[in-house]
């Protein structure tokens, strides 16, 4: 069954051939998740690449000369948005000197505008609040239902850039959604035992995942987003874990492990490391693979 899903995601609509070599659109994305979805939607009419690796935190990329050259040649730039890439993308865009992919032009697509963001601030953000995104929580790709919205937005933009292939892009987006909708039922069934259960996460990045699979995040290891835990904050967290009988701590692989190991030692809580992106682990080659891997880790770690 997984083999069939992989065919739909990676090879859908390959029966039609472009009439010109230049019919292939060059797409650069800020994450491998967006690149994978763009590849599924665009099929053979696009060449889709990611500017960052799925093994890394995309907040902290560096605008390298190789990335600048790629963006200079791109027909379409896809970004997560909500200021996720604020530390490096503006400089990259300025250096690339490609008017096509500048904000407001047809080759620039901010996918945060295709979804409903949580955590949008209605008050001013100050540094003592930690690493808070004023425009909202940017980790929305971790809800597979948002993956469908992303695919539809990409199909719409590709149709503007290559209207002669609009029907193909729309058909591919529908096929993408059909696979995700079928898989979502399986994934929810696999995690049905976590419904309404309290869990802890390391960072405030898994809210969309929790919403999709209906578990409750009651605290983070970080006392504030982006702020390292202290002895005092860990002591308070231990009290909360014991009082609420919390048995699961979910975190991404690039966060430090000392704090989770200490909490496990003190309370018995089980840390579960989940992949956060396509490409985060070997075998995670497309968007459905990502959730297959996440659900597998959560199922094993919570039993």
Image (spheres, rainbow, N blue to C red):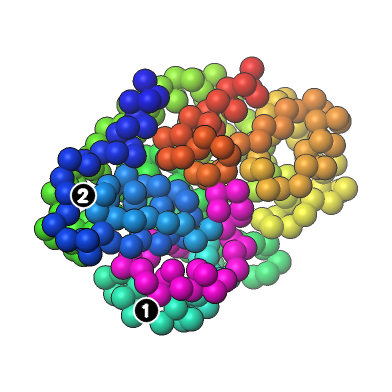
Q: Which dot marks residue 230?
A: none
State the residue at coordinates (40%, 62%). Answer: 28
Q: Would you name the residue on which mark 1 appears?
A: 98
Magenta segment range?
A: 53-82
Eyeballing the image, is 203 above or below 216?
below
Which quadrant does the N terminus fall into?
Answer: top left
Q: Would you name the residue on which mark 2 appears?
A: 169
Q: Report x, y in % for residue 95.
A: 48, 81
Q: Report x, y in % for residue 194.
A: 56, 24
Q: CA distance from mark 2 to mark 1?
A: 24 Å
Eyeballing the image, is 95 above or below 11?
below
Which quadrant does the C terminus fall into?
Answer: top right
Eyeballing the image, is 137 above or below 144?
below
Which secondary structure, mark 2? helix
Q: Is residue 6 visible?
A: yes
How many marks overall? 2
Q: Residues within 10 Å of mark 2 (few under 14, many from 20)?
A: many
In the picture, measured across the screen, residue 245 lies left or right of residue 144, that is: right
State the residue at coordinates (49%, 61%). Answer: 51
State the residue at coordinates (41%, 52%). Answer: 35
Residue 173 location, quadrant? top left
Q: Earlier in the sequence, mark 2 or mark 1?
A: 1
């Amino acid at each position: 069954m997984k083999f069939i899903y992989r065919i739909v995601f990676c090879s859908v609509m390959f029966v039609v051939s472009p009439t010109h070599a230049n019919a292939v659109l060059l797409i650069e994305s800020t994450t491998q998740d967006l690149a994978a979805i763009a590849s599924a939607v665009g099929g053979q009419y696009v060449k889709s690449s990611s500017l960052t690796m799925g093994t890394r935190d995309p907040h902290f990329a560096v605008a390298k000369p190789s990335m600048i050259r790629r963006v200079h040649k791109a027909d379409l730039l896809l970004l997560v948005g909500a200021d996720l890439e604020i530390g490096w993308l503006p400089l990259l865009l300025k250096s690339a000197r490609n008017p096509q992919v500048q904000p407001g032009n047809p080759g620039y697509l901010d996918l945060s505008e295709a979804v409903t963001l949580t955590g949008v601030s209605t008050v001013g953000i100050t540094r003592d609040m930690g690493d808070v995104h004023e425009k909202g929580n940017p980790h929305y790709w971790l809800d597979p239902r948002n993956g469908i919205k992303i695919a539809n937005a990409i199909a719409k933009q590709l149709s503007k850039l290559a209207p002669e292939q609009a029907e193909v892009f729309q058909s591919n987006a529908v096929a993408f959604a059909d696979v995700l909708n079928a898989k979502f039922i399986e994934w929810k069934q696999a995690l049905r035992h976590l419904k309404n259960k309290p869990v802890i996460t390391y960072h405030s990045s898994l809210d969309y995942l929790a919403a999709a699979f209906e578990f409750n995040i009651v605290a983070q290891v970080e006392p504030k987003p982006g702020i390292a835990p202290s002895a005092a904050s860990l002591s308070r967290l231990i009290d909360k874990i014991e009082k609420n009988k919390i048995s699961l701590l979910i975190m991404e692989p690039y966060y430090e492990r000392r704090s989770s190991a200490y909490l496990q030692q003190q309370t018995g809580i089980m840390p579960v490391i989940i992949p956060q992106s396509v490409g985060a682990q070997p075998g995670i080659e497309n968007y459905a693979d990502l959730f297959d891997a996440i659900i597998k880790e959560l199922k094993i770690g919570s039993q």
